Amino acid sequence: MSTTRILLIDADDTLWENNIYYERVIAEFIAALAAYGVTASRAQKTLWETEQRNIKITGYGSNAFCQSLHEVVHALGVVDLEPQIRQWENFIFHHPIELMPGVRETLPLLHSHNHLILLTKGREDEQLGKLRRSGLEPYFHAIEIVFEKTVQTYQSMITNHQLHPATTWMIGNSPRSDINPAKAAGLRTIFIPYHTTWQHEIEEIIPDGDQTIVLETFAELANHFTKETP
Ligand SMILES: [Mg+2]
């Protein structure tokens, strides 16, 4: 595989909208708590602290997120919201897929010139469900659904898929999950920032020479990856 260029591609908020559904639920959650006299700042602070504590154990996705909502309403003594939390979980799990601009046209082009691997965090059933609903599954040679994206995750990807770091790129919207740990593992990276990236994923990008390219849209990938490697 030495002459094949590998693109590891993030899914949520890189291929399709994801964070907007969580933000919608959080806004409704805070409004619902306000009706019980909980201020928005107290609700936000409690949710943030609960999520930070839980994420190491529960990982990512709608079920993990809604477990935190359940804990918050217990901590605040507003258990009347339990049925509503189950509805919100259902809403996030089954949302229709809205592809990011340019993905529908660009992914087939990338597929014809590169070896594509989807690399996403979250629960397998939820992430596979989104991939099927997206119609993008045929463009990927492999799908990797991981608990967390750390330097070790990328090192395992290099070993398991026999990747050559010089011809392997990680593409995503999260500095914390897609860019910094991939760079630390020796991969090249493409950062496509997104306006609603979750607070948890925000981190300064480690400065370097030419190891990270920043693009404004997914479509711009076609300028970089539709020529054969020498
Ligand atoms: Mg993402």
Image: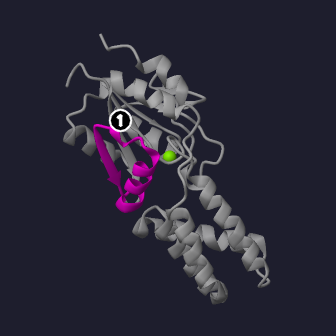
Instruction: Give the colour scheme of this rendering.
Output: one colour
> As displayed, is residue 220 above or below residue 195?
above
Residue depicted at x 60% and y 86%: 74
Q: Position of residue 77 (x, y in %)?
A: 66, 89
Q: Position of residue 118 (x, y in %)?
A: 36, 42
For the C terminus, the image quarter is top left
> As displayed, is residue 202 above or below residue 170?
below
For the N terminus, the image quarter is top left
Q: Is residue 103 visible?
A: yes
Q: Nearer the viewer, residue 224 or 102?
A: 102
> As displayed, is residue 108 above or below residue 202?
above
| 137 part of magenta stretch | yes
Label 1 CB less than 8 angstroms from ligand 1: no
Please tell me in which quadrant of the rendered image residue 183 appears: top left
Q: Secondary structure at mark 1?
A: helix
Question: Residue farthest to the top?
Answer: 230
Three-letter amino acid code at the position of disc 1: Tyr
Side of 186 relative to 216 (left or right):
left
Residue tagged 1: 139
Q: Position of residue 113 (x, y in %)?
A: 34, 21
Residue depicted at x 54% and y 50%: 201
Side of 92 relative to 170 (left or right):
right
Q: Residues within 10 Å of mark 1 (few under 14, many from 20)?
A: some
Which residues fall within the magenta stretch?
A: 124-147
